[in-house]
Image: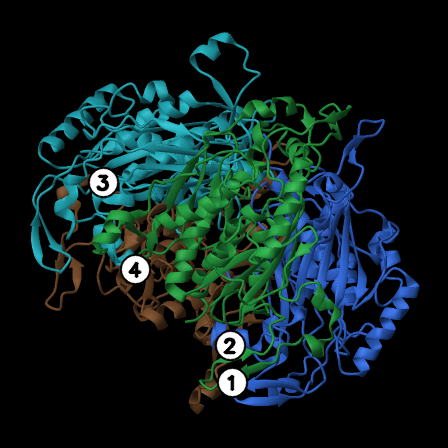
Chain colours: A cyan, B brown, C blue, D green
């Protein structure tokens, strides 16, 4: 009820502040019997991890996730090569508790902020909401909280893939005004992670990286857009009215820090078309498989998946933490000038890729289970 | 769980198909003691009602709402002029059940669609989800369902206004490529409803109306954008992580039929700015009241309201029902040509205004109550 | 959140006051494709209906339920004899809205109670909760609200029976101190409804009826116990920790007006045994079907059904409304003497039978769906 | 949805198996600004801790709880004596994550049970539910899971006490057939914990202890009844229909392992009375404070608290784990004889006292917050 739980059947509840002892969560509702590769979970965390490239925050967190419950060793995994390197687990149907320790928290960086409100941060609004706040590192408002989402999402991805071959892949489409035109080849970890900005065109990626470095050197930050694509979602997922698949995706993605806009399928540009131009004609192939000849719907019609690729675009504003002097006020309303400190990303988009994918996976994992009750 | 309920503390659950006996719902969680003007509720329904102007569907529904429960006559309303014309009620804290009869349903218009899938409608996806569907008039997927949301939203508006003077006002900003530049004067029923397209600039409204009439005469449809503004939300509403105020608004608005995009504050255009340009500096006036000198955050920071105006933009695609021939398939996958029939809107945006406002009101009403548990 | 919704996947939300225009509700989450016999629904309501025998309240309500949505005519029901007499419907997966009109409300009977608190009623507590109340007929606190539960439960029964042959049968085991010893023959509508007190032994039923008539003639009321038995629930339903099947049943049944106690299986008497006496030994028959040689667990172990008969006993206190003078206070705390008026049951147990069965059906229907997500 | 979360506004979600790495949970929804004494939390855990007396299981768990988030040090706690001994914390309004390590798990004790079903345990039902199970120590079905509830309940107790002086006190009323008559003096930790069986009459406690020792020496187990009393709950808490205060208490308490029966107020014995005998007459004292002259309602009328003491009685069956040979079956349905192993309590009632109190505290804490939305 306090908004720390996401999902209705597959539910993740997270806890933790940026500079507390640990962050973590509970993933509940995962069906029993799912084979889980914990290396893949850690690997997703590593993709999100701070300090992993020259264009991310220098905060250095190993972000090793510890699992407490809900898993047993897969005894039927008899392949000795697996045993030695990559032990597989199996879900028991009970909640999976986990945590990630905060090791490199430098809370002293934040002491000067105790009584001041950083522009476009959550300092002021938290104070207004709660009457107090954990000032260290942004507390619960810090994007560090999203590491727990990545853990849950990484398990949801395995549920989706093992049961339906569903794959989710996001990439950085635009940094400020440097954008890459759409290509169907832009899909999959190998392509996306081929450079540190996670834009799957190396030329444009180079320009983006240069732009981000300039912003960083100037003490400034940049925003942009991410596109996330999902393949192999069967037709029929999503609920018809309030919990439309697009509505749940919009909420999931808008809940990521710094997100200011969401488009499904044709989005805002589709509003320039006429109905006769925008409609996606149905067709069928020789085997009788139904498809649409275009996909302006973005794979969702009437709130329910139609079997086509699900396409969502997300707008990230430039991060609020800058190293330039800014006008602000203190707790008593006095005007002050604020100098930027702390360790932050000049552009969050590369690190946001696994977060975006995780939120999509959590939404789809939830609707996978919900669909089980749709028919007799 | 089937997505027919919205909200956590203030909850609306709706039922009903376009061509069934009635649509309706239950508004639950409204605190006891709220004075409710049922005329205002009916008035909101009238704003959404079909057949109300030459640019909407000719379906003729009176859309009179009947209330079954949860209200008692306000005995302390001793003003005789009130008594005669506009009896006020008071909420008892128990659920408010209501319905709206479907009177002008012409189901025979839909018989030819029983075995065919209209492009970009929910016919195909419903069949895939449920294995069957109520084919008449789009069934539950019809935008007729939103009338129940308007009833709930109209009551939520009164909760917001009577307790906090919160006002919500939406207008049509753009039809296809005809748009109106922002003006702070574009606020309030009187201004917005001054013309049938609900664009508060009469010149631009005329151009929009003409464009819609052309589309209608051509058997085609148009989309566009709506902006919704909310004043007087106190700082501190919204939950920090998954149930951010912007996330809940995004879900609420994305759940409206035909919506393909959502922007909060600076939205996609804000991604072109640098952090130093985008940040909203805090300031305070002589009385110590805090404000931001700009409002690119759209009134929400870290998922929580900051006291500034809340600004959201919504993209509506052109309606899928057109009167032109279209390629499609039947249930067996055979290719067919579909002729458009039925009564539909050439452009839904004017009628969507009260629906957008209703969804914003339901989100804010919910968070009004949730905020009551935020502090000791 | 205001406690007017029950269930997590199969959800019923009810509305309505005893003397308002209508009571009713929405049953949501029912899978598409279920054949529904609406006559059976009405028949359950008739079992609960007031005025049906000399030992129930003389309030005369036809209690005809009207359905608004969520159902289509079962076109594949080609048996002409069905068509003429008992049209079958089929669920569409969308919410089923319904209402029952209040026709014989005599609100003037309650005017004298506006400022007084009837002992052991909800008058005082509603005033303390809400600051106001609908005084007519007990408002939302009236047992009339349970008619909506019976509608939802009657549909849930059909879900349970058609998918798993699950049958639920309750009977009056005790009125005051007149009780009937357990017999395995006490199961099924035919046996239970063979007399007006719904105790399946005619001799003991006669004694119970006589005792109830004496109480009624004396202006007094009686309580007792109901046993509810459920057959054919598969092993494996129920959640392990908070939503144990017994816990959900306890809540469901304790939420019925006048209930003061719940026992599952051996209940309080089982606490007198030793573990070695109480344990239910497992055994298996020739076909390998597992069973327990005793059933002190009442069909539930570790919160999960084990395939044996589910046994629950419910204590109903004597109804609070009596026709004798009682000491009480008015709203201002002044001591008064209260005379009983209104039309009420001298003993609610016979009419509570269909309510008890409905709540059990709603719990099991919910867990039927929840079990669909337990395994990969 | 998998039943690992309890509460609607104040929510606890727990994780963990008896012999996994850790158990723990997240307490969410606690308002910001509550002073929390973590020593009191640990103290409640110590009351529940195994190995604490000669009549409990010899499993030796320190049960030290670690908190990860949601708390900050109370800077305004300036009393130096507090600082040195018992640092106070303050809630931030964000979720409180915690865990308790499993240190003395002897999983090898359970290896012989992998393919067998212990009578009246959850082995068989878990297998039927999930298709697999964590066999060590009962896994998630173990009463060890309740330690997490005690942590949440201990914090809820502080919320209740600091805001309303609400106190909850449970005691062992009966072990098998040895019972203590009610006395108003039986309230409070000092009285209840004065002996190891937690029956507040030392004579009867001695008899109970002797009986438990006899059962233990005989390899057998005993059940009994616990009474839980709650003082100072204001009139007006609880929801009218499904979430009646008694219904939520019944669910909460029935979800504790081994519970088979619940009575509120007069319970089953009240069903022997007439309405005229059972009704609780209202009265008021000189200051106008309303009270009832009797309390057969157990402090709850129409599902809502009336300001009187809340009285609930809970039946605990004898624990299923005994050290005697028992008939059972293995996974393949073959009949076997099972020897009892593992470390278990001959009578769980003394250790169940803090669990019962915790569940009552969680229910009341939830309704404390829910009541904040009942009125305008």
Q: Is residue D342 visible?
A: yes
Q: Between label 4 and label 1, give the one nearer the viewer.
A: 1
List the residue tagged with mark 3. B271
Disc 2: host chain: C
Q: Nearer the viewer, mark 3 or mark 2?
A: 2
Mark 1 near mark 2, Cβ–Cβ under 8 Å?
yes
* C240 with respect to A198 (left or right): right
Are the two marked residues, 3 and 1, in contact with CB atoms closer than 8 angstroms?
Answer: no
Q: Which residue carries the number 2 mark?
A: C127
N-term-proximal mark, 4 vs 3: 4
Q: Secondary structure at mark 2?
A: helix
Looking at the image, residue B180 sits to the left or right of residue A72; the answer is: left
* Gap between marks 4 and 3 measured at Cα: 21 Å
Rate crowding at label 4 as few (under 14), some (14 to 19) or many (20 or more) other CA atoms within 10 Å. Answer: many
The quarter holding residue D242 reads: bottom right
The residue beneath circle 4 is B229
* Distance (Cα) linking label 4 and label 1: 45 Å
- Alpha carbons under labels 1 and 2: distance apart: 9 Å
Secondary structure beneath label 1: loop
Disc 1 designates what residue? C331
Q: Is residue C355 above or below residue D308?
A: above
């Amino acid at each position: 009820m306090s908004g720390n739980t996401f999902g209705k059947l597959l539910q993740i509840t997270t806890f933790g502040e940026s500079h507390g002892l640990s962050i973590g969560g509970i993933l509940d509702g995962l069906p029993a019997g799912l084979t889980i590769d914990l290396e893949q979970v850690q690997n997703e965390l590593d993709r999100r991890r701070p300090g992993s490239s020259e264009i991310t925050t220098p905060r250095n967190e190993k972000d090793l996730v510890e699992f407490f419950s809900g898993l047993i060793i897969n005894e039927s995994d008899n392949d000795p090569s697996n045993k030695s390197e990559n032990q597989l687990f199996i879900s028991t149907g009970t909640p999976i508790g986990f945590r990630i320790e905060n090791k490199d928290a430098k809370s002293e960086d934040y002491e000067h902020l105790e009584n001041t409100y950083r522009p476009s941060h959550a300092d002021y609004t938290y104070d207004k909401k709660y009457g107090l706040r954990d000032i260290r590192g942004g507390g619960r408002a810090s994007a560090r909280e999203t590491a727990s989402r990545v853990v849950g999402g990484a398990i949801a991805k395995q549920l989706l893939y093992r049961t339906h071959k569903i794959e989710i892949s996001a990439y950085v489409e635009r940094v400020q005004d440097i954008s890459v035109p759409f290509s169907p080849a832009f899909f999959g970890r190998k392509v996306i992670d081929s450079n540190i900005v996670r834009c799957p065109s190396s030329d444009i990626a180079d320009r983006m990286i240069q732009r981000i470095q300039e912003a960083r050197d100037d003490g400034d930050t940049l925003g942009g857009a991410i596109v996330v694509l999902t393949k192999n979602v069967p037709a029929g997922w999503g609920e018809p009215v309030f919990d439309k698949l697009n509505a749940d995706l919009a909420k999931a993605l808008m809940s990521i820090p710094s997100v200011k806009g969401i488009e499904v399928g044709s989005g805002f540009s589709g509003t320039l078309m006429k109905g006769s131009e925008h409609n996606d004609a149905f067709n069928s192939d020789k085997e009788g498989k139904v498809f649409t000849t275009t996909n302006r719907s973005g794979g969702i019609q009437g709130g329910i998946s139609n079997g086509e690729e699900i396409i969502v675009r997300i707008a990230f504003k430039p991060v609020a933490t800058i190293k330039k002097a800014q006008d602000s006020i203190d707790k008593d309303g006095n005007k002050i000038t604020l100098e930027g400190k702390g360790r932050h990303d000049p552009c969050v988009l590369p690190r946001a890729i696994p977060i975006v994918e995780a939120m999509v996976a959590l939404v789809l994992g939830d609707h996978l289970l919900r669909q089980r009750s749709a028919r007799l």
